[in-house]
Image (tube, rainbow, N blue to C red):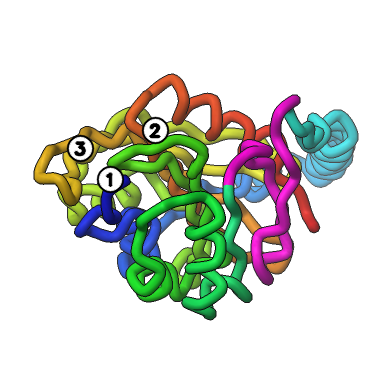
């Protein structure tokens, strides 16, 4: 096995913390325009329109689609994500490092030794110092281990736009791909695929097929999750599992 990538494996997620969210403008409230329109009518008509508008709003709230139900796919384990207040599913055979381990290079080294990995405990401890969780597939020798990192995202006050995520990825030297908004049990999440060429310790270059996922947290904040593998289908599978299983801890 070779040493870890020279560039931090969770660079995309770290950049999401450094780059502030783009300004978001909310569309005008529909009830305000209805009220303005009604004011030009007679008082009886205005009263009728207001009642109708109120009833319609109540009906919309009543028929609003329920939040997505969280499900954990077979072969995955629901995992608490540090102090974020959320949990999501990760492949059951992966090695998971939480905040208590990431703050202790000796504990990281123990896990690496158990798996036979020659990754550097010191490098993981330094690059993942802000992470709530860092998980790797250490089950097979590789110059690049598939991994997932999750970090708190204090700069976002609203769900980030495609432009915001694309800017973060571009700073990292990545090429942004497809942007989506996904419904989760926590609320709407934003995702953006990307590719990123990385040089590994043996001098070869691998193309990371990644996905950035921004999940809402119960306290009104956001968690930046980065899924990194060298296979786009695997990245999508893991990302789908995270999105479908994300829930309050």
Q: Secondary structure at mark 3?
A: strand
Neighbour tally class for label 3: few under 14, some 14-19, many 20 plus, Cα within 10 Å: some
Q: Is residue 169 left or right of residue 49?
A: left
What quarter of the picture does the C terminus occupy?
Answer: bottom right
> Quarter-wise, where is residue 118 in the image?
bottom left
Q: Which mark is residue 26?
A: none
134 falls in the magenta region: no
Q: Are marks 3 and 2 in contact (CB under 8 Å)?
A: no
Q: Secondary structure at mark 2?
A: strand
Which residue does the image show at 53% across and 34% down from the upper left? Answer: 239
Q: Which mark is residue 166?
A: 1
Task: Tell me the CA gap for discs 3 and 2.
Answer: 12 Å
**Location of mark 2 (residue):** 179
Relative height, residue 223 to residue 237 (above, below): below
Task: Tell me the CA gap for discs 2 and 1.
Answer: 9 Å
Q: Position of residue 99 (x, y in %)?
A: 60, 72
Front label number (1 vs 3): 3
Neighbour tally class for label 2: few under 14, some 14-19, many 20 plus, Cα within 10 Å: some
**Location of mark 3 (residue):** 175
Looking at the image, can residue 192 be seen?
no
Identify the magenta region.
74-94
> Quarter-wise, where is residue 93 in the image?
top right
């Amino acid at each position: 096995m070779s040493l870890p990538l020279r560039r931090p494996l969770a660079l995309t997620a770290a950049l999401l913390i450094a780059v502030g969210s783009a300004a978001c403008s909310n569309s005008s409230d529909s009830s305000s325009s209805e009220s303005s329109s009604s004011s030009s009518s007679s008082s009886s008509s205005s009263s009728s329109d207001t009642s109708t508008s109120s009833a319609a709003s109540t009906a919309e709230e009543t028929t609003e689609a329920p939040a997505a139900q969280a499900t954990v796919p077979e072969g995955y384990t629901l995992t608490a994500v540090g102090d974020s207040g959320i949990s999501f599913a990760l492949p059951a055979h992966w090695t998971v490092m939480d905040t208590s381990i990431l703050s202790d290079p000796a504990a990281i080294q123990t896990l690496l030794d158990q798996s036979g990995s020659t990754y550097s405990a010191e490098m993981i401890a330094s690059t993942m110092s802000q992470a709530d969780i860092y998980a790797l597939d250490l089950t097979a020798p590789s110059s690049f281990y598939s991994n997932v990192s999750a970090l708190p995202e204090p700069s976002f006050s609203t769900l980030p736009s495609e432009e915001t995520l694309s800017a973060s990825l571009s700073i990292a030297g990545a090429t942004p791909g497809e942007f989506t908004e996904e419904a989760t049990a926590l609320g709407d999440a934003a995702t953006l695929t990307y590719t990123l060429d990385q040089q590994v310790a043996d001098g070869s270059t691998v193309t990371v097929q990644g996905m950035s996922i921004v999940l809402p947290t119960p306290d009104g904040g956001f968690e930046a999750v980065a899924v990194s593998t060298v296979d786009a289908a695997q990245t999508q599978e893991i990302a789908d599992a995270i999105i479908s299983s994300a829930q309050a801890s």
